[in-house]
Image: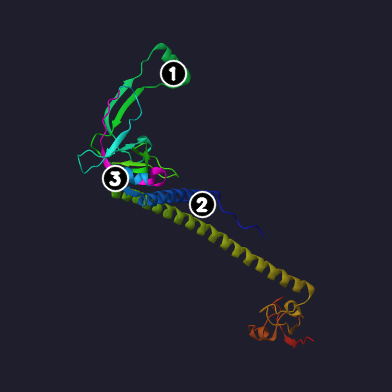
Amino acid sequence: MGSPERPSVAQIVLLASSSAVTAIFYSVYRHKYRTAQTLKGAKKISIDDDLPNVLMDLPGKCVPYAVIEGRNDQEKVIHQRTNTVPFDLTRDDSDEPGPSIRIIKPLDAAELDLETVYEKFHPAVQSFSNVLGHFLTGERPKGIQETEEMLKIGAPVTGVGELVLDNKLLKLQPPKAGMLYYLSSMDFDSLVQRQESRVQLWKILTVICGVATCVTLFFILRRQYRQHKEKQRLKQLQKEFEEANSRFLDGENEEVRNACTICLSNQKSCVFLECGHVCSCNQCYQALPVPKKCPICRNSISRMVPLFNS
């Protein structure tokens, strides 16, 4: 009796890949969910004249996760190449001078929407040394793509991060404890809705992959269960056959060996003359067609003598 058939390589690969994808999607979903919940719990701060005094009374002179809505109000002349220029946020509902908040490390923020104001492609100069170097390295650069992006003055900005008071200067900087830093042109409610929609997307993908994994596992287990039941049935049949064969060989069932050759159920109880064969029970003898003939040698039966087993 062979061992049950194992799952095929394709089934194992399908189950492993769907389980891995489900785990990845669930991990991303949990991260997005925590991010959205943290964003919803951020404290909204208004840019007003009392803001420095409010921060002075807080531990460490900071709000760990704050929401600032304002507009860009910083203009600088750049004389050298640089990656980023710090800028300030002021109130977006008034043109009167008031407190401003310095934005630190804006390129570290998510959802940062910048407008492309300059874009130019500079083709590479193909000198002999350059061609030789490209041939040896197997790489041939086509040129340099130069792109300049900026946030225009007066553009509405929503910032979410750590709000601190540093030497009478209000700063919004990347938060600690793994929370995301946001700078977006959307308002706070729209920003929260976008994050929640992403959470729903990853949740749906996780559920779909989870269902696919469960279906695959169900079919594999059902196949293994059927193979197990079939193996048990075959073992039971083999056991019954061995027990019946053992009883026949050991003489435990004398009735089986003396069974009628016609019906195979009743005991032999008739002696046919003149041939002398003992091969039938009385019921089968009575059912033989006329003229009655021995079922063994096909000779005519002149008379029947009853046989009594003791």
- Mark on residue 134? 1
Number of marks in the rendered image: 3
Q: Which quarter of the rendered picture does the N terminus lie within? A: bottom right
What residue sits 45% from the left and 51% below the top? 26
What residue sits 39% from the left and 50% below the top? 38
Residue 77, position as x, y percentages in the image: 27, 25
Read off the residue under disc 3.
Answer: 50
Q: What stretch is highlighted in magenta?
A: 58-78
Q: Earlier in the sequence, mark 3 or mark 2?
A: 2
28 or 246: nearer the viewer: 28
Residue 298, position as x, y percentages in the image: 69, 77
Residue 76 counted in the magenta span = yes
Q: For numbered disc 2, what is the local secondary structure?
A: helix
Q: Which quarter of the rendered picture does the C terminus lie within? A: bottom right
User: Which amino acid does the dot numbered 1 rest on?
Assistant: His
Q: Furthest-left residue in view? A: 95
The local crowd at label 1, few if under 14, some if 14 to 19, many if 20 or more residues have their Cα within 10 Å, is some
Q: In the image, is 247 to the left or to the right of 182?
A: right
Tell me the CA gap for discs 1 and 2.
46 Å
What residue sits 35% from the left and 23% below the top? 144
- Mark on residue 201? none
* Residues at marks 3 and 2 touching, judged by CB atoms closer than 8 Å: no
Q: Earlier in the sequence, mark 1 or mark 3?
A: 3
The local crowd at label 3, few if under 14, some if 14 to 19, many if 20 or more residues have their Cα within 10 Å, is few
Read off the residue under disc 2.
Answer: 15
Position of 122 relative to 262 (above/below): above
Residue 55 counted in the magenta span = no
